[in-house]
Image: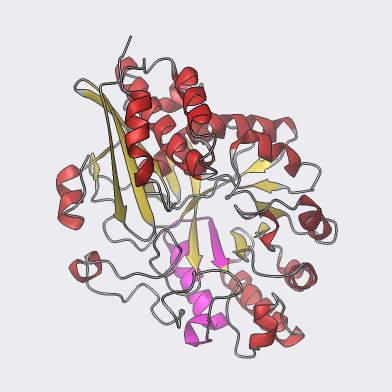
Amino acid sequence: MIKITDVKVSTVQANFEWTFVRIYSGDLYGTGETVSAPGIMGMVPYVKKLLVGEDVLKRRRILEKLRYAFSYAGTTAYFIISAIDIALYDLIGKYLNIPIWRLLGGDRERIRVYVDAHASKSMEIVDAAQTEVFPDWLKQYGGESKFETERMVSLTEPMVGRVSTQRWNEDYTPENYAKRAKEIIGEGFTAVKFDLDIPTPYLKDYNSRSGQLSLRDIDYIASIVKTIRDVVGDDVDIMFDLHWKFDVNTAIRICKAIEPYKPRWLEDPTPALTSLTQNFDEITLITQNCSISIATGENMFSYYQFKDMIKAGIRVWTPDLTKAGGITEGIRIADLAYLYDIEISPHNIASPIGTMAAAHAMSASGTFGILEWHAHDLPFWNEIVKPRKKIIENGFIVLTDEPGLGIELDIETMKKIWPEFNL
């Protein structure tokens, strides 16, 4: 028996909010992570009450206990459960002196990664309400030059969606998209994703509020995709995210306009599968009229929800393992995708902890495609972990035989960036 003796939780503001959960068994511990969700810290006293005294090795009992305990908590429960699951795996791996990917029976030792490049600059830094913030570490690391500060007119609006106030600027030119793509591919990456839910020079407020675009807007978006394809060539996968912004007709028109440039996928075209709604009939209208693979799933929870993706014609599944249920649920979703030979390419806005958790899980996936990386421009990405190394190199994560996740948070460095951090 490996009895849980303590649980600690701490949240920091990076490009997104990162919440870390550490589960202790005496001096041994495992670390997990979940992503932005209001209300996570309010669950901590209940988590401690439920976990302390449990046997780490009885992982399924622990997870079921948590699901019943948080049955009134809504989807936020899956966020904290995901972090706990990852922490349990890390702890078990350390106890058995084996890496998680081997514990799972995985065979992929190199995990392909793509950069989420946003537009021609990094996305804004956002809190758990998806509103822009300016953390103190920006001053430590040389200001805001790599992060967008002009996209949002109001700091009280969410980053994505139809109510966001956006104005076109030169960051959204085809030339600047192409320049960013060329830089990323030059670093050895073989895949890159960009946002297309952007303001164009022709955007009208009445269209934007309705999730619609004019033909001129769509032609402009298609010109961005064409320029990127011309720069990267046919050996590189390009993908595009619409962040649930458009209505069905507009999404289909965008799809038709960019089809000649052969993107690997078009992601989240309508609000059909946000965390608030699940409208598979709506997404089916798009998959039936678009030859490009539609990707979605980052706001879905558990493999129970993913089973309905098949009849909707969704050909790329993008669960986020730090909120869909952790490594345990990630393996179940991957196995379901494998049953139908459907690609699974996880969404990932996490720190190195959550990123490595997804990499270990995908080592055991039969139809794994590419793992997302949202933190390309974070200056401290490789500084906050031990052993100090480049986690992603030449577009791949290389899994090692280090036990558990294979990395640790560097607590001293974390506290220099976030003095309030405590695990």
Residue lying farthest to the top in this orientation: 1
- The quarter holding residue 310 reads top right
Residue 122 is situated, as x and y percent measured from the top left of the image, at 42, 69
Q: How many marks?
A: 0
Going 27% across and 66% down the picture, which residue do you hit? 135
Residue 272 % position (x, y): 70, 57
Q: Is residue 373 magenta?
A: no
The residue at the point 36 percent across, 17 percent down is 54
Residue 14: quadrant of the picture:
bottom left
In the displayed structure, does residue 147 sit left or right of residue 282?
A: left
Residue 101 seen in render: yes
- Left or right side of 313 for 318: left
Q: How far from the left and from the top, in percent, is residue 208?
A: 65, 80
Q: Nearer the viewer, residue 59 or 95?
A: 59
Q: Does residue 336 sit above or below 409 in this rendering?
A: above
Residue 357 in the image, given as x and y percentages of width and height: 43, 37
Residue 179 inside the magenta-drawn segment: yes
Residue reaching furthest front? 72
Which quadrant is home to the N terminus?
top left
The magenta-colored residue range is: 167-194
Residue 248 left/right relative to 15: right
What residue is drawn where x is 80% and y is 71%?
Answer: 249
Please identify the quadrant where the C terminus is shown.
top left
Q: Is residue 111 visible?
A: no
Residue at 50% over, 73% down:
119
